[in-house]
Image: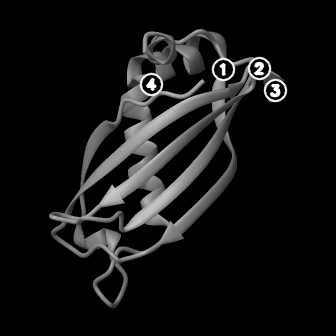
Amino acid sequence: MSNQKIYHFSAQVYYEDTDHSGVVYHPNYFKFFERAREDIIGVETLSRLWHGEQIGFAVYKTQIQYHEGAVFGDILDIQTTWEKESPYRLIFRHRAFRPHGKKPAVTCDLHLVCLGREKKLIPIPDLAFLKELYNH
């Protein structure tokens, strides 16, 4: 089931995010996308799961495409949708737009799985942000 609501997260591009050419160093987009996911799921929820229940999320697979480099000073609009593909996998679809961008600068489909205490695959817990999937 897919969430059609687009979640927006603003990510400031700092000098430290760029390479010698002044463009965002390509792996740093994963940091921007991670921050958006943490915001969607909720830092308090993630902290409770990790510290209280020893449950965490791990990246299972990614597909990322770079279309245009963001630069120092940009404020990116990270647009995210998500779906629960199975009881064990979430897919987040991230799109990073530069200011006034008509097309995304970067696109990424990222698959997450949930791991329990033994670092073994477990079903995704019933989390508040997933309930939005069923309310559309």
**CB under 8 Å between callouts 1 and 3?**
no
Of the two numbered discs 1 and 3 on the same chain, state the one appearing first in sequence. Answer: 1
- Kindly identify which residue carries mark 2: 117
Q: Describe residue 128's horizontal placement relative to residue 7 as left or right.
A: right
Under tag 4, what secondary structure? helix
Which residue corresponds to mark 3?
A: 121
Q: Quadrant of the C terminus?
A: top left
Measure the C-alpha gap from mark 1 to mark 3.
10 Å
x and y percentages locating residue 17 in the rendered image: 33, 69
Circle 4 residue: 41
Q: How many marks?
A: 4
Give the Cα distance between marks 2 and 4.
20 Å
- Residue kind at label 4, given as amino acid type: Ile
Q: Earlier in the sequence, mark 2 or mark 4?
A: 4
Helix or strand or loop: what does disc 1 sit on? loop
Q: Quadrant of residue 22?
A: bottom left
Query: Contact, CB < 8 Å: mark 4 with mark 3?
Result: no
How far apart, in angstroms, are the residues tagged by discs 2 and 3?
10 Å
In front: label 2 or label 4: 4
Residue 98 percent across, percent down from the top left: 24, 65
Q: Amino acid at mark 2?
A: Arg
**Residue at far bottom of view:** 21
Give the foreground label among 1 and 3.
3
Q: CA distance from mark 2 to mark 1?
A: 6 Å
What separation in Å lies between label 4 and label 3 (alpha carbons)? 19 Å
Q: Which residue is mark 1?
A: 55
Q: Earlier in the sequence, mark 2 or mark 1?
A: 1
Residue that appears at 64% across and 11% down? 53
**Residue appearing at x 34%, y 46% in the figure:** 79
- Report crowding for label 2: few under 14, some 14 to 19, many 20 or more residues within 10 A (C-alpha): few
